[in-house]
Image (cartoon, rainbow, N blue to C red):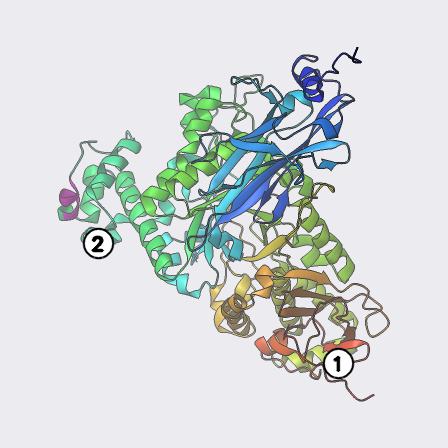
Amino acid sequence: MPDVRPAEPAAGADLRTQLHHTYRAGHYDNWCVWAGAVSIEIDGLRFAPALGRAYVHADSAPPTARARCELFVADVSPASIRFADVVARLCIDAPGLDQPVPMHLRTDPQGAAEMCGANFVFESEPFRLRNTGAFRYTIDISADPDDRRPWIALSDIAANPAGVIVVSPGWVAEAPTVTEVCLRKVDAALRDGTFVSGRINHLTARLQQLSTDVIYLLPFFRPGLADLQTGEDVRKGTLGSVYAVADFYQIDAQLVTPPEEVDLAALVAAELLCEADVADVWARVLQPADPSPALPTLAELVDAGGRLAARQWGCQRLLQLVGRAELRQLTRRAHELGKRVIFDLVLMQTSRDSTLIQQHPEWYVLDAKGRPEIHRIAWLVYSDVALFDLRGNQPLQDYLLEVAPYWMACCQLDGVRIDASQTVERSFLQRLKNRIQQQDPEALVLGETLCALRDAADIPVDMVYALLVDFHRDAETATPLIDFLEEVHGAFAAGTVAMAYFENHDSPRATQVWGERYAQVLAADPALARTWRRRSGGTSPATLMACLKNLQATLIDATAGMWPALEQPSAAVRPEPSGGTQLAWGIEWGSEWGEVGRTDFENVTCLHPEARHVSPGQELVGAYERLAIEAHQWVEARRGQVYYHRNLGADGDAEDRVLAYTRYLDTSALLAVHNLDIRRTRWVSIAFGWLSWAPGDPALVFDSYQALGLAAATTAPDFTRQGLRIGVAPLQTRLFRLVPGVPLLRKE
C-alpha cells in the first residue's frame, strides 16, 4: 500500500487564522502578529506617516506616490506564501482617489515573498496626487480570499496612526520670500500727539518698494477694546492689539480712507466695488446708532458722494465698502507686480467684546463665573482676548472654516498665515487647508510654529517657521548654527519649506539690539572703534555694523537650507524617511532699511521709512533689492543639497567664527562664507574632496561689503593644496558659484 500521510495545513490558511480568527481588533499579540513600518514614497522621497510632502506644478506631471508597510506573522514560512495569499489596500481621502489603492505582497521573479528581516513587505500600486490639500491615509490588510473579504486596519493590529500627506502649490517649493507688514504702522503719523493710523492704500503705494514675493498682512479685522460683560477697557497698550478680533467679517475702520476723502465713482469705474458688496455689507454691519438700514443701490451711494452717503446710510457701512475696495486695490497691484498677499488668520480667540460671546457662549472656554477665559500660551498671557473652545467644537470650526475663503473670494487674497498653528487641533488644520485650497488651489497656508521642532513636525501647512531668531541675534560662532540647521533637516519632512527671519512683530528690532551691543564694544575698544570709523566714513560705526549683520542674517536665511536627496528603497532594507528643509527668507517691514523702532502695534509709535533714503539705510535697501533679483538665479540655493564645512581649523578659524557651507547640484554649487566676527578678517581653506566633481576657479556672485558700498582688503580666493583659500572681513558675507573645472594652484 502506498504511504499515505495526512496533508499539512497550508501556510496561507495558518496566516489567515492568525490574522482573522485568533485575535480581536485592538488586542493582537504583537509577538505573534504585528503590522507597521508604514511609509510613503512621493517622487523618490520617503516619508513617515506623521507627514509627507508633495508639490503640484502646473507645467509638469502630478506627483507619483507609492505606499509601503510590513507584516509579521509568527510560525509562517515565507517560502510557502504567494502573491495572492495576503493583500492590502491604501485608503486615502484625496480627490480623485474614490476607491482604495491596491497594495500587493512584494515578491521576487519566482513568486517568493521578498522579506525585510522576518517581515512581509507590501507596496501599493503607484497613484497620482493631483490636488493641493492635506489628506489622510490608512492601510487595511486581508488574508481571506472571499469576494467579500474582511479587512483589518493596521491600527487594529498595532499602533499605526493615520498618515498625512500635505500637497502644496508648486510655487511654494521655490521658497518664496516674505515681508511681514502691520498696516496700522505703514506711514502712520503723530499729529499734535494723536496717533494717525496707517492705511491700506499707503501700503498699496509702497508695494513696488517691497522686494519679496509674498506680503503677509497682520490682522486687518475690526479690533475690540473692552470686556463685554464688565465694560472694562482691557486693550493692550494705547491702541489695542490687532490680534484681539471683534469681528472676522469687518475691516478695521482706522485702516480705511474716510468717506469724505473717497471718490466712490472712481472705485466703481475701476471695478473695485459692485452691487453685491452693498447687500453683503448691509447684512453684516449692524450698528443701531446708524441711520436707516434700508438698502441703497450702488448708484445712489455714488450720486450722494462719500460724505453725504455716510450721513444718510451710516459711516460704518460706507467704511466697510471702501475698505474692501482698497483691499482689492492692494491685491490687484500686488498681482501686477508678481506678488501675492496673504493675511493673518486668528483661530484661537476673539476680543472680549466680540458679539460672538453673546451669540455663542458655547464656543468659548468659560471660567467658574461663566465668563470666557483669557488666552495663555506658555509664559504669555493675553488678557485682552477670550479663548475659543476649539477642540472638537464642530459648529465653531465650521464657522471659522469660512473666514479665509470669504476674504480670498471677496478681495482676491492669496492665502493665510495661521496664528499659533501649533496650538490648533491637527484634524481641524487639515480641514482648513482643504477648504482654502478648494477656494484657490494655488493659495499659501503658512503656519506660525513658535514651538519645539518636534511639536511642529506634523502641522499640515505649506510653510512653517525656522526658529533662527535667537541664533541670528546672539550666535557668535558657527557650530551652534550648524547644529540647529541639521536638527531642522532631521525634524521636518523632506522638502519642507521654512520661513527664516531675524525679527518680527513679537521681537525687538534686531538691528537695534546689534547696534547697541556694538556701540558698547566700540566704546570699550578704541582701536577697534578707529578701524570701524575708517570703514564707515560719516556713518555711525555701530549702525553700519548692525546693517552688515542684518544683511548677513538674511543671506544665511537665503542660502543655508537643504533640498533632500532622492532614495532608492529596497525590500531587504527598510527605507528611512528622507530629510531636508529649504529655508525661505522673510523680513519685517523696515528690516530692509535697518529700522530700529519695534513694530509695537499696540502703542503710539511710528516707524521711520524715511531712513531708506539716507545712509546706511539707502545702501541696505539697494542690497535687498539686488538680493531679491539675483537670488532667483541661484538654483543651487533652492534645489541643492548642503555640506556644512565644520571645523575649518587651524588655517585661520580655530575660534569657529566663520560659517561656511556649500549648496551643490550635479554640475554646479554655491559656496557661502560668513564671518561672524566683528574684530578681524579671517582666512579659511575649504576642501572639496567630498564633492563628486572638481570645481574650477570660483565666481563671486554676492558680496555684502560691495552691496553696502564698502571696500574690503581681502583678495580673490585661490586654490592651495589645502583647498580654496578665502578671506572674509569682519561681518562680511561672500557668495561664490562653482562649476566643474581645473583649479589653479597658487604658488607657495
Q: Quadrant of the N terminus?
A: top right
Q: Nearer the viewer, mark 1 or mark 2?
A: 1
Residue 49, quarter of picture = top right
Q: Residues within 10 Å of mark 1 (few under 14, many from 20)?
A: many
Identify the amino acid type marked 1: Phe
Q: Quadrant of residue 748?
A: bottom right
Please give left or right for residue 396 compared with residue 677 in the image: left
- Circle 1 — which element? strand
Which residue corresponds to the image point at 62% horizontal and 60% vertical from the top-left?
557
Report if residue 228 is visible in the image.
no
613 lies above or below 391: below
User: Chief secondary structure of the magenta span?
Assistant: helix
User: Which of the labelled discs sits on residue 263, or is there none?
Assistant: 2
Left or right of residue 720, residue 624 in this image: left
Is residue 182 or residue 562 the one in the foreground? Answer: 562
Q: Is residue 93 in view? A: yes
The amino acid type of the residue labelled 2 equals: Asp
Query: Residue drawn 70% across and 41% down?
Result: 571
Q: Is residue 260 positioned above or below 704 on the image?
A: above
Q: Are marks 1 and 2 in contact (CB under 8 Å)?
A: no
